[in-house]
Image (spheres, rainbow, N blue to C red):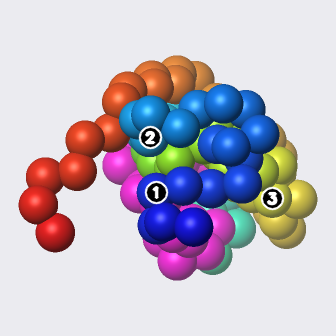
Amino acid sequence: MSESLSRRSVITGRLADEMIHISSAVVSVLPQNRDDVVRALEAMDGVEVHHMAVSKIVVVMEAHDSGILGSHLAEIATWPGVLSANMVFEQAERFTRIGD
């Protein structure tokens, strides 16, 4: 299979254009765990920390499938010191490759 053709795209009939999903989320944490959670978030592929307060962290996530975003949030919610991880916004756009 080509790089842009996945099993899921064949099953769901989405063979034409890839999609890019961008989401923002708020992660609520215990203040004493904030720095550890921020480090773990920064180590995740496709996750960027954009703001942090005493017990809140704002992240932006990017993936080719909204299920990946949901999986990231579900994983984050299980981390020590995390009280919740909630999606605030999601945008899906057709992804066009520009060169190699």
Residue at horizontal 53 percent and vertical 38 percent from the top: 15
CA distance separating discs 2 and 1? 7 Å
Residue 64 as seen in the image, left or right of residue 10: left
Question: Tag 3 or tag 1, which sits nearer the N-term?
Answer: 1
Q: Position of residue 60 (x, y in %)?
A: 44, 44
Q: Is residue 64 above or below residue 75?
A: above
Residue at horizontal 88 percent and vertical 59 percent from the top: 78
- Under circle 2, the secondary element is strand
Residue at horizontal 48 percent and vertical 66 percent from the top: 2
In the rendered structure, find residue 18 and report the number of the disc placed on it.
2
Residue 51: say if magenta: yes
Q: Position of residue 44 (x, y in %)?
A: 56, 70
In the rendered structure, find residue 4 and report the number of the disc placed on it.
1
CA distance separating discs 3 and 2? 25 Å
Q: Position of residue 66 (x, y in %)?
A: 64, 37
Q: Amino acid at mark 3?
A: Glu
Highlighted magenta segment, given as a residue range = 37-57
Residue 50 as seen in the image, left or right of residue 40: left
Q: Is residue 42 above or below residue 58?
A: below
- Under circle 3, the secondary element is helix
Q: Which residue is mark 3?
A: 75
